[in-house]
């Protein structure tokens, strides 16, 4: 069985990102989904890579190393990623000594309920297939 780690961009228990992740992970499949929690991670600081590395970093990296793929469900936050998710990705992007993300399949699903939704992440290019929904549960046309 393929094991998929799930990173949810919002730390809120009632976020759209969490609801979307819960929906996709509840669909019948031969995948095993495991939420990778990152709220306890200390801020990334390259000075700690070689001395006084936080044990939370090692535990998080090992958890990511143990999955076959990643599902990231996140909102656009101030035209970027939420800070906690960015910190988690920074911690994973550094070889220590192993690569944690290289060669690992990743699916990113973005959502936004704000007034400026779809500005950046939801409709990035014509080569992607975005699925933005409006309040009436209809797809927006990004083109």
Image (cartoon, rainbow, N blue to C red):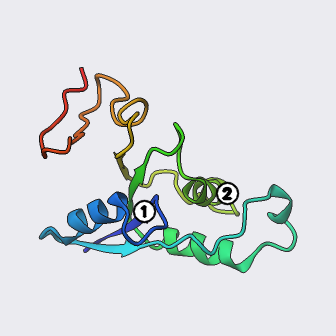
User: Where residue 95 is drawn, which disc sits there?
Assistant: 2
For mark 1, what is the residue? 8
> Dot 1, crowdedness within 10 Å: few (<14), some or many (≥20)?
many
Locate residue 90: give its quadrant.
bottom right
For image coordinates 29% across by 64% down, the residue present is 19
Asked whether, in this view, residue 13 is left or right of residue 43, the answer is left
Which corner quadrant holds the C terminus?
top left
**Is 48 displayed left or right of 3 in the figure?**
right
* Image x and y of residue 22, in percent: 27, 68
- Give SS at disc 2: loop
Name the residue at the front extreme. 115
Q: Residue at x 19, y 27 (%)?
A: 141
Residue at 56% from the left image edge and 60% from the top image edge: 100
Residue found at x 40% / y 68%: 5
Q: CA distance from mark 2 to mark 1?
A: 23 Å
> Which badge, 2 or 1, is on the more N-terminal residue?
1
Residue 115 lies, in percent from the top left, at 38, 37
Q: Name the residue nearer the viewer: 65 or 108.
A: 108
Q: Nearer the viewer, residue 23 or 47?
A: 23
- Mark in front: 2 vs 1: 1
Q: Establish if 34 lies above or below 121.
A: below
Mark 2 vs 1: CB contact within 8 A: no
Q: Quadrant of the N terminus?
A: bottom left
Q: Position of residue 17 (x, y in %)?
A: 36, 58
Residue 94, above or below 56: above
């Amino acid at each position: 069985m393929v094991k998929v780690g799930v990173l949810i961009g919002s730390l809120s228990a009632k976020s759209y990102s969490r609801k979307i992740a819960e929906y996709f992970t509840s669909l019948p499949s031969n995948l095993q989904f495991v939420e990778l929690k990152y709220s306890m991670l200390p801020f990334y600081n390259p000075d700690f890579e070689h001395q006084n590395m936080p044990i939370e970093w090692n535990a998080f990296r090992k958890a990511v190393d143990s999955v076959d793929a990643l599902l990231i469900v996140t909102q656009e936050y101030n035209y970027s990623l939420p800070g906690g998710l960015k910190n988690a990705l920074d911690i994973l992007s550094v070889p220590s000594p192993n690569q944690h993300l290289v060669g690992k399949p990743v699916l990113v699903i973005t959502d936004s309920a704000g007034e400026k939704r779809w500005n950046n992440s939801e409709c990035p290019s014509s080569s992607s297939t975005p699925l933005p929904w409006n309040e009436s549960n209809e797809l927006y046309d990004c083109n």
